[in-house]
DNA sequence: ATAACTTGATAGATATTTTCTATCAATGGT
DNA sequence: ACCATTGATAGAAAATATCTATCAAGTTAT
C-alpha cells in the first residue's frame, strides 16, 4: 500500500507512467497495476487517461495530498527510529536560491560539526522549484525568500536580511561613489539573473519604482557566470551584499550600497510543516535558529 | 507495511500477541512475524519480550506514535475519497460518558437526517476510556467533560453545561424544597455512579467542599440502574439535569436544583486533532457546532 | 495518407511475500 | 512437579507482486 502511494507521488511528479515507474525502480506495467489497484480498492478513478497520462481526477488530487503526508510520515518514522538508535545519519537534501548559495556553508559547517554522519545534497533552484520540491518530498528544506510570495504548508525560520550592492569597476561611471540610488543604477547596463529567479524580479521591481527599467546586457541563472563577467571590470551587476562579500572583490571592483530605498528582503529556511519534523530536519532548524542571529551584520 | 503498523497498534491495545492477532483477523505467528519484520527493517527492537509481552521499547513507543498517525491518515484518506464519490457513508463510532447518553440523540438525530447512509455505534465509557479509545483510533469522537482533566492531542467542541439535581421522592426529607444546598445533599443517602466515573468524582468533590462526604448506599456504572432505584421513591440520587429531564419524572419524584455552589461543568465533543478530519467526523463536528447553541436552556 | 513512434494496458510466467498449520521452548502459577 | 499460557519457529500453501513480451490507440513526421 505504501509503495502504491509512492507510485502515485512519482506519477504526479513525472506525469508519465513510464518515467514514474523508472523513478520508482519498477517496470511500467508494475506501476500501472499499482495505480489501478488503488483505484479499484477505493472504487474511484484517480487518473484521467486517454492513451497517455492526462491529469488527476478530483479524487486523485485528494489521494495525492494524503499520499504526500502519509509517505512523508512513514519516512520520518524510519528516520527518527534510526536516529534514536544510531544517532543522526542519512542525507540532508536542501535546495537554495542562487543568491543564497554562498551562505549555505554557514548552516552546513556547524551542522556537520554536530552531526558528522549526515551527508548533504544541495540543489540550486529558483523559489518556485523549491516549494515544488518540498511539496513532493524531494528535499528536506529550502532556503529562499520568506515574506514575499505565498508559501504553502511550510514552516519558516528567518535567517538574514538581504541588502543590495552595485558591483562595478572603480573607474566606471558611479565607480567612485560611496552609495548610489536605484534611479542611478537604472542607467547602468547590468548583468542579472534570468527572470525566473525571484531575485531578478525583486530588482526589476526596485528599478521600475525608481523610474527606470531593467535592460540587462547579460542574463544567466548562474551567479558564478555573472561574477566572472563583473570581475573583468567591463560589466556591472546588482547582487546581494552577502554573495558579493563572499566572492571576494579585487581592488578594481567595488560593491557600492544602493539606497532610496535601502531595499531589504528576508531570507529564511523553509521546511515542511510536519509535526514532529524528521530528526535531520529538526536539527537543521535548530542550527538555523542558532546561526540566524550572527548572519545579519 | 501499513498492515504491520496495524499489528503494532493492536499489540499496544491488547498487550498480548495472541489477542492482538485475533483483533487483526490473522493468526498469532503472522502477527509475530509482522512485528519482527518491522523490527528487522528498522534495525531496532520495538517490544520487550520475555516469554510474553512485557512492554514497548522507547523506539517502540515512537513507532507506536507514528503508526497511530499514519494508520489514522490512511483510513481518513479512504473515507474521504469514498465520500467524494458516494456521499457520506460508513460507521460513526462515538463513546460517551453515561451522564450524557440521554443527549446523544440531539446529535445523532439531525446528523442522520443530513447523512442517512451513515451508521452509528455508540459506547458508554468513562472519560479515561474515551481518551484511550480516541488515541487508539477505536472511536471517531467522544462526548465527555472538556475542561477538567488534561486532554491529549484532541480538538474539542463545547456542547452544553451540566447542572445538578437532587432526585428524590416528594415525601422524603428535602422532597418539598424548591432548591437545596450541597451541604444538605451531603446528609442524604444516595445512589451514585461508581468512582471510576468522572461525574462521581465531581459530585464527591462538591459534597466534600460543602463539608460533607459521599457515602453512597448504592453504586453502579449504569444510569438506568440508578434511575430505576430512584423511581421506587425509596432511594435518592444526584444527577445532571439533562438526564433527569430525559428519563421523565413521575409525580412522586422531584428533580430539585442544587445550589451553593451552582456547579457547572462543560460537556463537549472530543475528536482526534487530525488535519483534515475524516468527512464523517467533520460532519459530526459541524453538527455539534450547530446543535450546541440550542442545548443550554 | 501512411509509416514510425510513443504511451499505457494486458496476458502469462516467474518470483517474492505473506499467511497458515503444527509444533516447540520458555515461563509462570498452582 | 505439573499443567497452562505465551510467543517463536519451521515448512507448506496461498496470495501477491513483478517481470517480459506484446498489443492497441494515439501522435508525429514524412
Image (cartoon, coloured by chain):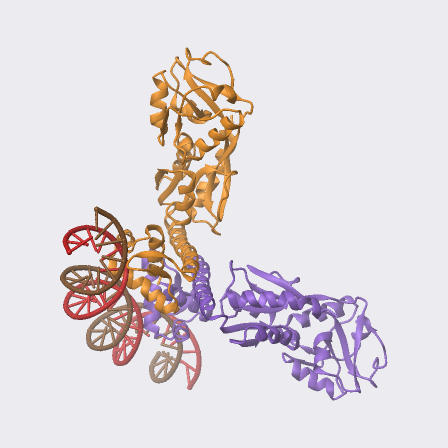
Chain colours: A purple, B orange, C brown, D red
Visible residue check, residue A131 = no
Q: Percent position (x, y) of residue B95?
A: 39, 39
Q: Percent position (x, y) of residue A157?
A: 63, 63
The number of numbered badges drawn on the structure is: 0
Is the residue A162 above or below the residue B164 in the image?
A: below
Specify the farthest residue to the bottom: A232
Q: Nearer the viewer, residue B180 or A142?
A: B180
Is the residue B23 above or below the residue C26 in the image?
A: above
The residue at 57%/75% (across/down) is A112
Q: Percent position (x, y) of residue A121?
A: 53, 76
Q: Nearer the viewer, residue B83 or A278?
A: A278
Is the residue A25 above or below the residue B60 in the image?
A: below
Residue B230's image quarter?
Answer: top left
Q: Nearer the viewer, residue C24 or B114?
A: C24
Visible residue check, residue B91 = yes
Is the residue A156 above or below the residue A21 in the image?
A: above
Q: Quadrant of the C terminus of chain A?
A: bottom right
Q: Percent position (x, y) of residue A229?
A: 71, 86
Residue D19's image quarter?
Answer: bottom left
Amino acid at each position: 500500500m505504501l509503495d502504491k502511494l509512492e507510485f502515485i507521488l512519482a506519477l504526479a511528479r513525472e506525469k508519465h507512467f513510464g518515467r514514474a515507474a523508472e523513478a520508482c525502480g519498477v517496470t511500467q506495467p508494475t506501476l500501472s497495476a499499482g495505480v489501478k489497484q488503488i483505484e479499484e480498492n477505493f472504487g474511484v478513478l484517480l487518473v484521467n487517461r486517454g492513451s497517455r497520462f492526462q491529469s488527476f481526477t478530483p479524487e486523485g488530487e485528494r489521494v495525492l495530498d494524503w499520499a504526500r503526508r502519509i509517505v512523508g510520515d512513514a519516512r520520518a518514522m524510519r528516520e527518527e527510529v534510526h536516529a534514536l538508535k544510531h544517532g543522526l545519519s542519512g542525507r540532508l537534501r536542501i535546495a537554495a536560491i542562487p543568491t543564497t548559495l554562498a551562505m549555505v556553508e554557514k548552516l552546513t559547517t556547524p551542522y556537520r560539526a554536530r552531526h558528522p554522519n549526515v551527508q548533504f545534497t544541495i540543489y540550486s533552484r529558483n523559489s518556485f522549484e523549491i516549494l515544488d520540491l518540498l511539496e513532493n518530498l524531494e528535499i528536506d528544506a529550502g532556503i529562499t525568500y520568506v515574506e514575499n510570495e505565498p508559501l504553502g504548508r511550510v514552516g519558516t525560520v528567518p535567517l538574514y536580511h538581504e541588502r543590495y550592492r552595485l558591483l562595478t569597476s572603480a573607474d566606471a561611471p558611479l565607480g567612485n561613489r560611496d552609495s548610489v540610488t536605484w534611479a542611478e543604477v537604472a542607467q547602468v547596463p547590468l548583468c542579472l539573473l534570468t527572470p525566473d529567479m525571484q531575485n531578478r524580479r525583486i530588482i526589476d521591481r526596485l528599478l521600475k519604482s525608481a523610474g527606470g527599467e531593467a535592460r540587462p546586457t547579460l542574463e544567466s541563472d548562474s551567479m558564478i557566470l555573472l561574477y566572472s563577467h563583473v570581475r573583468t571590470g567591463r560589466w556591472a551587476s546588482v547582487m546581494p551584499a552577502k554573495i558579493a562579500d563572499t566572492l571576494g572583490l579585487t581592488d578594481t571592483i567595488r560593491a557600492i550600497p544602493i539606497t532610496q530605498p535601502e531595499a531589504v528582503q528576508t531570507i529564511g529556511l523553509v521546511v515542511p510543516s510536519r509535526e514532529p519534523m524528521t530528526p535531520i530536519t529538526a536539527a537543521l532548524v535548530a542550527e538555523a535558529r542558532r546561526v540566524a542571529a550572527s548572519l545579519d551584520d
